[in-house]
Amino acid sequence: MSDSEILLHVTRGTLIESAHRGHIAVSDRTGRIFYSAGDPRKVIYARSSMKPIQALPIIESGAADVYGFTPEEIALLCASHNGEEPHTDAAASMLHKLGLPCSCLQCGPHAPFDAAAADKLAAAGTAPTELHNNCSGKHAGMLALSLRLGAPTDHYMEPGHPVQQLMIRKVSEMSGVPVSQLVLGTDGCGVPVFGLPLHRLAAAYADLGARSMDRTGAQGQAAGRILDALRAHPFQIAGSGRYDTRLIEVTSGRLVGKMGAEGVFTVTYPERELGLALKIEDGTQRAIYPAVTEALVQLGWLEAGEAEALAGFHKPVLHNWKGTPVGEILPVFMLKKQEPPQI
Amino acid sequence: MSDSEILLHVTRGTLIESAHRGHIAVSDRTGRIFYSAGDPRKVIYARSSMKPIQALPIIESGAADVYGFTPEEIALLCASHNGEEPHTDAAASMLHKLGLPCSCLQCGPHAPFDAAAADKLAAAGTAPTELHNNCSGKHAGMLALSLRLGAPTDHYMEPGHPVQQLMIRKVSEMSGVPVSQLVLGTDGCGVPVFGLPLHRLAAAYADLGARSMDRTGAQGQAAGRILDALRAHPFQIAGSGRYDTRLIEVTSGRLVGKMGAEGVFTVTYPERELGLALKIEDGTQRAIYPAVTEALVQLGWLEAGEAEALAGFHKPVLHNWKGTPVGEILPVFMLKKQEPPQI
């Protein structure tokens, strides 16, 4: 097992003030590694980057159709959203269609990630609700799946619940990791999270993209509908100023990516049936976007003009409280090409 | 030069989800290294951990006495404060004594670090001012020093200004690093920050403590007054729920420490004439306090009961949005004892 690798320098004046290490894997749906940095087999928690995979059973089971979820709402299944109005409106609409009150969402409340939305709530003296939780779409989807499966809606977060059992099997199927080898932890929003080798997370994203291209059967249809929903409504996956939203917008949906807490990011490139997964060793969010964008540039996955449109994420300039530039975050790694296996 | 070392694991369930690396140096005032982790000679920016050193010329020059600064206000010179009322009141009082308006503080405004104070401002629809900037005490002190030196007050942040020139010479004197070898950058609040080897920052803290013990001359008197002010008013250095404040409270001032942005912490142990300096490689604040507390435990600098009183900082339990424990931050390093030099 190789060690983590320095991916980014954080400069201030003439000095490298801080550095972020991490791991990157680029794989096809079989898990074959095409490019890497650090240890592409590092076992990591996918955190929220698994949401688009977890959206699959909600479509495949028919739950999304039975309850009439719109594309905006299907996109919200995959979101770690900002808690802006389009997000909370969609989550509220999903609950309304399910005939369930907001209190059935077991994710807990937190202030909107979006500062303007949070300030607006605070100024109104209104406490945030479960709808503002960045995971509210996923939880609404899990409630829909509970109802569809005829399972109780009050313990849908527990690993033994039929909803989570279905999620576990789907993650295993897409990543190629046997159920018995998936490491389960608890996410910030209470549901199980999945620990697996980084290249297997990349494989799940390659598989999602590949299925969306051939659209064969319920699985292919579901993959296609999820990616189409995100392409049509990229705001729903994150929101104002967020990378996940901009990546879809800037590439016109050729690439779809999803962040996860503790420094995780995943990308699917459906046309090439490849997936990318990244883990920042220290879990810092500021390191995700420069590292992912640099990887996409090195891979040639961004076309002319697209890297420029993401420049503010790629090599962000750091400012002091008065707005004067004081430093930068700079990618410093080179992806390693893996030789094809000898036959 | 040795590399950084893993200081902490961040666990979730059964997996190590993230890790933080860093460097630690424990030195006497000559810069001799007694204990270390990672590379104790790593060149780092001290950031706000330099504030107690930078407070020295404000006392030694007579500025603090000419303008009648109280111990609460002297303590605020050293602060990266929470923007709570005792902090903003002290900063406002200092400006009043100087006969200068708040707008003379060139640190820029930012919302109080303390969430309750920030919410209170937001709920009142009041914009934060320069007084809320965590550095407002230091900046008020620099204005006092400008007036005392008969220098203009409008460019006190520039490296060539007499105030900053005095700061640079003081940092050089305390750390033992020649002025020509100090690396200058720009801090979040606009003034110069100092880049120097980590063990030299520890040496400056050892020197501060040693001077405070003998109290010889203007320099010893100033060092003693600064540490006494922090011991009498530990709330001023940081505020509610903050480690810097608690460390002084818990040790009854036997140890005095100061955080800096991008993962820096410094401690002085005056009775032993030793200093400690720490840098988290990735700059993450959450990693500072577990690493420092563990180092203090290994050094035997905390007495029975004191480590327990700091337990929430030492091995913090991580919770999800609903308050359920999901993981921990755990120190995993052992300080290396340096052999005494052969004579």
Image (spheres, coloured by chain):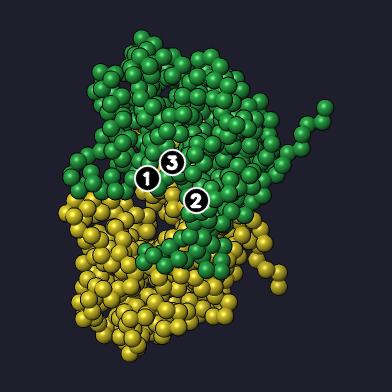
Chain colours: A yellow, B green
The local crowd at label 3, few if under 14, some if 14 to 19, many if 20 or more residues have their Cα within 10 Å, is: many
Disc 1 designates what residue?
B240
Which of discs 3 and 2 lies nearer the camera? The answer is 2
The answer to which of B298 and B14 lies nearer the viewer is: B298
Residue type pointed to by label 1: Ser
- Chain letter of disc 2? B
- Chain letter of disc 3? B
Q: Is residue A12 above or below residue A50?
A: above
Marks 3/2: CA–CA distance: 13 Å
- Residue A269 image point, x, y percent: 45, 65
Q: Quadrant of the C terminus of chain A?
A: bottom right
At 62% from the left and 30% from the top, the residue drawn is: B273
**Label 3 element class:** helix
Which of discs 1 and 2 lies nearer the camera? The answer is 2
The answer to which of A38 and B137 lies nearer the viewer is: B137
- Residue A89 image point, x, y percent: 21, 67
Asked whether the beta carbons under mark 3 and mark 1 sit within 8 Å of each other, the answer is yes
Q: Are marks 1 and 2 on the same chain?
A: yes
At 28% from the left and 51% from the top, the residue drawn is: A115
Asked whether the beta carbons under mark 1 and mark 2 sit within 8 Å of each other, the answer is no
